[in-house]
Amino acid sequence: MPKGLKQTSSIIVIGASVTESAPNTFTQNRVDLQLNPLDNEVFVVTGIDMDVSAPDAIAATDTAQVMSITTTSQTTLPSLALTACMARKSLNIRAAGFVDGGVSFQEAAGDTPPATLDYIGIIATNDFFLQTVGVNNAAAGSGAMKLYGYRARAEASTYAALVQSEVLSS
């Protein structure tokens, strides 16, 4: 349990998805956590599972579908270097120079914390965001996720610091 927080619920599982509005178009969905800011309520993320749709296999063309989860709204797909990015996953097909559909690769970061970590992140505002974008795909891609965690009440100074940090990290 993070210092300055008191757990107020058992583990909660939140599922959500995002689908591109058109092929290869950055699309973002907002997920409301319905936290109570009057009680300094936060959400402690203990695990994330992401499922990204497969990119199209097009001869001689590299394709990809990428998805991320952030604590703040984004205008482009973030990298893990952004403090607000809790997890990112990409599926890639490398086919440039090949006459067939190429070879697929998967990259994931932030899905499951190592056993030495108690949590992945803390969401102090009322929502979090899912983003996806494809590269060179013929059809719109999508992604789905499950976020695992629990509600907690923060001490006033801890809550103020968490909210300020989250807002400034965008």
Image (cartoon, rainbow, N blue to C red):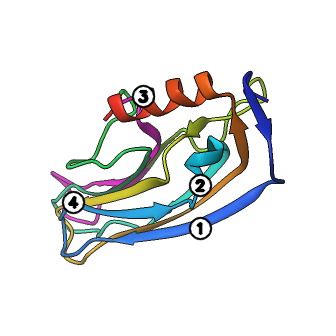
- Left-right relation of 60 to 143: left
Q: Residue 15 — which label?
A: 1
Q: Counting residues from the N terminus, which is met first, the one under dot 1 or under dot 2?
A: 1
Q: Which amino acid does label 4 sit on?
A: Phe
Q: Is residue 100 magenta?
A: yes
Q: Counting residues from the N terminus, which is met first, the one under dot 1 or under dot 3?
A: 1
**Element carrying mark 2:** loop
Q: Counting residues from the N terminus, which is met first, the one under dot 1 or under dot 4?
A: 1
Q: Counting residues from the N terminus, which is met first, the one under dot 3 or under dot 4?
A: 4
Q: What residue type is labelled 1?
A: Gly
Q: Residue at x 27, y 47 (%)?
A: 74
**Element carrying mark 3:** helix
The residue where tag 2 is placed is 35
Up the image or down, 129 lies above or below 3; here it is below
* Quadrant where the C terminus is found in the figure: top left
**Element carrying mark 4:** loop
Q: Residue 164 — which label?
A: 3
